[in-house]
Image (cartoon, rainbow, N blue to C red):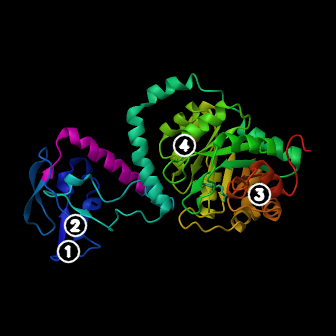
Amino acid sequence: MEALVSLRATVPSLTHRPNKLSVRKSISMDLPTRNSVSVASSSSSIRAQQIESKDGSATVAPVPVPEEALKVKEWEVGMFQNEVAASQGIRIRRRPPTGPPLHYVGPFEFRLQNEGNTPRNILEEIIWHKDTEVARLRERRPLLALKKELENAPPPRDFIGALREANLRTGLPGLIAEVKKASPSRGILREDFNPVEIAQAYERGGAACLSVLTDEKYFKGSFENLALIRNAGVKCPLLCKEFVVDAWQIYNARAKGADAILLIAAVLPDLDIKYMTKICKMLGLATLVEVHNEREIDRVVEIEGIELIGINNRNLETFEVDISITKRLIEGERGKRIRDKGIMVVGESGLFTPDDIAFVQEAGVRAVLVGESIVKQSDPGKGIAGLFGKDISLSPN
Ligand SMILES: O=P(O)(O)OC[C@@H](O)[C@@H](O)c1c[nH]c2ccccc12
């Protein structure tokens, strides 16, 4: 049996896009386990209203009272973001598309599993989790409080300048060495994980900059690690490796001592990247904008103020790694455009040997971002010499 749940008249603010609010749901009598429907009583704060359903018959549907209209509005914004993103080829949805918040769906709550509520891949799962995580954190420390903290933050250092300098000094790509304990694709990379010791070893080994993972749930990182490394006196500029979905996170990163932050083009529409880059500039942070395919790099190159683009050889949706992606994305005309604009390119992920480094250098990168191959070594500093095939520390012995 098929039922059409029309939300049109339940959310007055959405009537300008009524077609987006008709949700077709299959409800069968003997509920199959994969499409199970859980039903709970609706909130008492919902008023009922008569609406016309598709076939013209009148039905009763709930109307949110004003204090809850805000939640609906938030949901609407989320949906709108998903649409803008999709128009730019972004497949990652910022929020689960089935909504609005449960009890607006009808006189009963309907929650259909595996019908849009399930993330399509790991990146989408991370983003959905991040969105709620940030909303919670933001409530506890509003932007205004965070802005105050900035006054006491250690001053930002020149991330891109350090990469350029290292490239000139060694004739090899400047190294961003990643402090990485684990990842969803590789599991735990290092059991005895002391972030400060690893950071100091990287610095001694000749890293130009460090990348510190701050996501807790999926990468076992933390902002505490970032602050510890900064406060231990490590001089290499620090990249905050986060999944940014909200400008609040940029202020937070700077407050913790970051010198640069990652923005992922597979997640953020152009306008977000543009305005987040502006905020970063204002705060003295560099942005590393990460891309993985032609469409993303073409979008990013045209955004005003972009200075550093990272090409991730790992597809964050499937975990597949292929270092020839770096080469493919900066070949020919596209590469020329990037060089003409003076944008520095970073080759990211899956780099293990001197041959790998030579391959991406030949392709045109002037910096690399490396985690697994060096963090796994008993002495991560010596791991750098192994990666480059030579000692690149400032005082080689
Ligand atoms: O450990 P690897 O394969 O050397 O990769 C490092 C870095 O490129 C990778 O951790 C990374 C690149 N982009 C990301 C975005 C989020 C989390 C992690 C990443």
Give the mark nearer the N terminus: 4 vs 1. Answer: 1
Three-letter residue code for mark 4 = Ser
How many angstroms separate mark 4 from mark 1 (CA)? 42 Å
Residue 103 in the figure: left or right of residue 314? left
Is residue 361 found inside the magenta-colored segment of the image?
no
Three-letter residue code for mark 1 = Leu
Query: Where residue 37 is drawn, which disc sits there?
Result: 2
For disc 1, the marked residue is: 31
Give the mark nearer the N terminus: 4 vs 3. Answer: 4
- Where does the image place residue 309, in percent across and percent down from the top left? 67, 51
Task: Kindly report which numbered mark, 3 or 1, lies closer to the viewer in this rendering.
Answer: 1
Q: Quadrant of residue 331?
A: bottom right
Tell me, yes or no, whether the two marked residues, 1 and 2, touch with CB atoms within 8 Å.
yes
* The C terminus: image quadrant: top right
For disc 4, the marked residue is: 222
How many angstroms separate mark 1 from mark 2 (CA)? 7 Å
For disc 3, the marked residue is: 336
- Where does the image place residue 23, in percent across and percent down from the top left? 25, 64
Q: Residues within 10 Å of mark 1 (few under 14, many from 20)?
A: few
Residue 349 in the figure: left or right of residue 111? right
Q: Quadrant of residue 259?
A: top right
Give the mark nearer the N terminus: 3 vs 1. Answer: 1
Tell me, yes or no, whether the two marked residues, 4 and 2, touch with CB atoms within 8 Å.
no
Residue 356 in the figure: left or right of residue 329? right
